[in-house]
Amino acid sequence: MKTYYDPEDLKKFGNISDFQPELGKKFFDYYGSVFADGALTKREKSIIALAVAHAIQCPYCIDAYTEDAMERGYDEEQMMEAVHVAGAIRGGASLVHGVQMMNKYKDLSM
Amino acid sequence: MAVLTHKSLAAQDHELSESDKQLKLLHEAGLTPFQDKLTDSGLFPLKPVELDIFQINMGKMCNQVCKHCHVDAGPDRKEIMTRETMLECLDAIDKTNCSTVDLTGGAPEMNPDFRWFVEQLSAKGKHIIVRCNLTIIVANKKYNDLPEFYKKHNIEVVSSLPYFSSTKTDAQRGDGVFEQSIRALKMLNAVGYGVEGSGLTLNLVYNPSGAFLPPDQSELAGTFHSKLKDRYDVVFNDLFAITNIPISRYLQYLVASGNYEGYMEKLVNAYNPVAAANVMCRNTLSIGWDGYIYDCDFNQMLDLKVAAKGQHLSDFNATELQERSIIVNQHCYGCTAGAGSSCGGTTT
């Protein structure tokens, strides 16, 4: 069955450099630096990445950072809490626009 | 007793209970031969360093049937070391300068001559390690005094606890195992094991409950220390993070869950030459329940006997064994992935 997303494509991520080596290299160097230990540890960055993966609904990122989080010692409860953080931010982002709706509603009302 | 939900592969007459079928499957994956990786690292043929550890498998009988068990141990396994073979072990040990004797199984304590054997080893002044599955201590009244017995002989106790919660532990080791393990840990703590200043060492072993590599050992140890103390008032010394080796029941799990190819690729991609140089088979000999000699417990389960004329304790020749080449195969990728893996945890 043909689908837009193929889990095997994740392994080919590096191939994006084939069509534009210079920018590809810059991106992967940057990516490596971002996920290195810094003011935040690799482990902390892993759970942030897992939450963001859900916020942006990237299936490749969800696969990659679920595995990464498990290999960094997170358990299912912690990982689901991270997903809820993404859900809360996304839900909040919709709901906070409710204030805009209310403002407009009031503008148009007597 | 822990509730048993599985039989051994041998009792099921499963094809992966046969070592040649396991080796065939490992080769069919079409991955770079481990031997080639070692050659690239300048380590092939892999040679021993000075022998330090005798690891003795006292039998395949166990009160648990863990999903990842590389021994395929369980209550239905009747292979057990006799006192005669233990005497051969003692003779062989006398012919070497090894400092440590590491007793494993199955549950080594289920061997009727376990205590007698420990007493003989203790009299020789050897450092003794017992790989205790914890639940055996509470499985039957006759085992309840094991903590006192371990203490008497200053045994280092090494026990598996894959997580500080019941969900992951029971999923891997059987229903009810976590609760019984905590009870047993408290009994060990009560006689001083794991308690600072007691001199009695209690180390825990973490291995992943699934098809992934272990986390950083030191980070994980910190979490285990705080969670076990806060939740259960349990203390211990070190945590060993061990990689699951793709043989026996763990191999069967990988195949059945569709994770086999992905896991093998992960191991190969994570090959670390530094870990390869430090593999435990270089300073260890592994003895089977029937007295045959192997490079490690994994080779033992794959029936890959040492490459020497004397392959049995009855023909033990320390000099010849020291000059042998260690037998490697595709499962060896498990010990060389990432930070490396041994019975004492990471190797880098």
Image (cartoon, coloured by chain):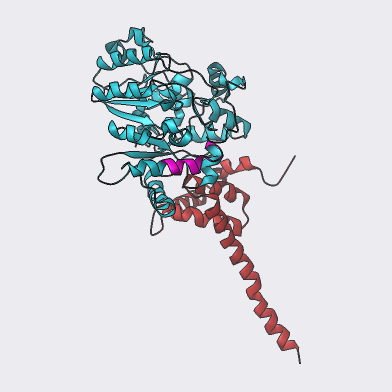
Chain colours: A red, B cyan
Q: Is residue A107 above or below residue B101?
A: below
**Total numbered circles:** 0
- How far from the left and from the top, in percent, is residue A10? 59, 44
Q: Which residues are magenta?
A: B173-184
Q: Residue B56's quadrant in the figure?
A: top left
B178 w.r.t. B328: above or below? below
Q: Quadrant of the N terminus of chain A?
A: top right
Which residue is more in the foreground, A76 or A110? A76
Which quadrant of the structure image shows residue B310?
A: top left
Front residue of this view, candidates B184 and B50: B184
Tell me residue B343's x, y (percent): 38, 31
Q: Is residue B11 visible?
A: yes
Along the line of sight, the residue nearer the viewer: B333 or B294: B294
**B202 or A27: nearer the viewer:** B202
Q: Where is the C terminus of chain A found, in terms of image quarters? A: bottom right
x 69%, y 82%: residue? A102
Is B194 positioned to the left or the right of B210 in the image? left
Query: Position of B39 compared to B172: left or right?
Result: left
Q: Residue at x 44, y 28 (%)?
A: B107
Residue A47: % across, % down: 50, 55
